Amino acid sequence: MINKLVENIKKTKAPIVVGLDPMLAYVPERVQKKAFQEYGETLEGAAEAIWQFNKAIVDQTYDLIPAVKPQIAMYEQFGIPGLAAFKKTVDYCKEKGLVVIGDIKRGDIGSTSAAYAVGHLGRVQVGSRSYAPFDEDFATVNPYLGSDGVNPFLKICGEEKKGIFVLVKTSNPSSGEFQDQLIDGKPLYELVGEKVAAWGEELMGEEYSYVGAVVGATYPEMGKILRKIMPKAYILVPGYGAQGGKGKDLAHFFNEDGLGAIVNSSRGIIAAYKQEQYAKYGEEAFAKASRAAVEDMIADIRGAVKLG
Amino acid sequence: MINKLVENIKKTKAPIVVGLDPMLAYVPERVQKKAFQEYGETLEGAAEAIWQFNKAIVDQTYDLIPAVKPQIAMYEQFGIPGLAAFKKTVDYCKEKGLVVIGDIKRGDIGSTSAAYAVGHLGRVQVGSRSYAPFDEDFATVNPYLGSDGVNPFLKICGEEKKGIFVLVKTSNPSSGEFQDQLIDGKPLYELVGEKVAAWGEELMGEEYSYVGAVVGATYPEMGKILRKIMPKAYILVPGYGAQGGKGKDLAHFFNEDGLGAIVNSSRGIIAAYKQEQYAKYGEEAFAKASRAAVEDMIADIRGAVKLG
């Protein structure tokens, strides 16, 4: 799947990923109303509203982008119906040829981590049959529990030719509380980065490994160091746009081949119509505003990074 | 909810929690067959099988125990139907008067962590109505992202009088890879423990805080130190039984009041009938084997710890 991701990026010349993290507050009144008319003001109604919202945005942007990253928390908050909308979104995006990164940040140990890996990237056995329950292409993984938590994902990635992005240095202001702590003079995130490189060695695609990393756009200097520590890891870069990261901060995350990083924007794209810059589209054309925001983001990155 | 947990523990004199982590392989042939007859060898069939398995075990043990801890990964691996069985299990256990600890190990940032907190412990707004999607009493939380990831949970815990258990030192063999790394001579897990104590200060129940910690039974010496660092945090102790922790290792996790810790066993209880010691019950009486295993676990802990 890393090969397909790289191929999609080369084809679109757009190393970006659209974060499908729908809040109900982002969904235009008209779309909400229609969903509530059909399902009432219920969890099912909310799930229908965010699904229709996602679908419109994907329909308007899929030809420009290589990948999407649905954030499962935004669906899980609406319980079972919300998770059904997550699954619908994953399936629809794959039909459109997009690579789907499930932003699930799971991480546990042994058979429990294996259950997450099976549920999201693999197949689960039921009697004589097997099923791929969520079937994303990639998943994000939390490393706090060490190799015991990551190995079950590696196993499934090898079997299914899928991939993971391990949290290394997250984009949020307090990420340093634990991640920046110095261990023999070296911050924890570097230690995690070294592990990512090691975990990825046995799982190489054509140019990059199945094992990638998450490093926030808000920390470009750390990105520069981590780029060198993990030369074969694709870096998923959150924190662009709404969180403050700019195009010029991104150069450090890429390799000299112009590859190696994929930059996420969520709110900045999916709620573009709420920003002054795209207000002219109005609520009615919210998905067109998202398309314009994608085009602007691509232009910003192409201006700042020499792409492969 | 911490008050109810403490009250339940005092009432049962059993500081234990049964981990409802059903693997399909634990579910007796007969139960699987019945579920598959009704739903086919489908995800729905698997979900029905684990739900019936759980229900039988809860029916046989609820009068002896204060709490259960369903591990969501084991349900999530069966997709949407599996998660519906998780929700059914949560609701059923609450009906039986048990405190439910959702072992979800979620952790993200800002609005995303808030979505997890709302989905599992709080209420989500849909138009003019609100819903409690999963509605566990406690949830486990991963601290790797720092305060930004934990604060949204604290907010909801305050509003709903619920609680969290933050991963501090996990029970698995490789937990030391990152958690034991020394920062100015102090291991990372102590630093996290100090944060847990600080996060919990503003959220005090009668005797203990809404903010607890996870510390593995497999590391009793570290438990001793963490007990002192977080005197008001309930410690959820996994790793007993199948993972190798013994009753005598547990004394360090308790306070002098005989409270402050609750010990989890999953496989050791729910798959007891597969162990030589309880083989006499046979597959047919699997739930009675679980009851006997609960009784033995309580006796082992009562023999090792002076309870309050």
Image (cartoon, coloured by chain):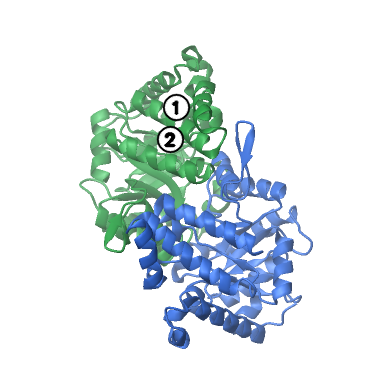
Chain colours: A green, B blue
On the picture, is B234 further left or further right than A149?
right
What number is the disc on residue B179?
A: none
At which x and y percent is residue B184? 58, 62
At which x and y percent is residue B179? 52, 63
At which x and y percent is residue A26? 52, 28
Mark 2 residue type: Gly
Count of numbered labels shown in the rendering:
2
| Residue at x 41%, y 35% (from the top left corner) | A264
- Given residues A37 and A263, the one toward you in this image is A37
Q: Quadrant of the N terminus of chain A?
A: top left
Mark 2 or mark 1: which comes first in sequence?
2
- Identify the subunit bearing mark 2: A
Mark-to-mark CA distance, 2 and 1:
8 Å
Q: Is residue A228 above or below residue B8?
A: above
The secondary element bearing badge 2 is classed as loop
What number is the disc on residue A269?
A: 1
Task: Read off the residue under disc 2.
Answer: A19
At which x and y percent is residue B33? 35, 67
Residue B104 appears in the rendering: no
Quadrant of the image occupied by residue A62: top left
Q: Is residue B67 above or below residue A32?
A: below
Q: Residue furthest right?
A: B206
Tag 2 and tag 1, C-beta contact below 8 Å: yes
- Identify the subunit bearing mark 1: A
| Residue at x 45%, y 80% (from the top left corner) | B273
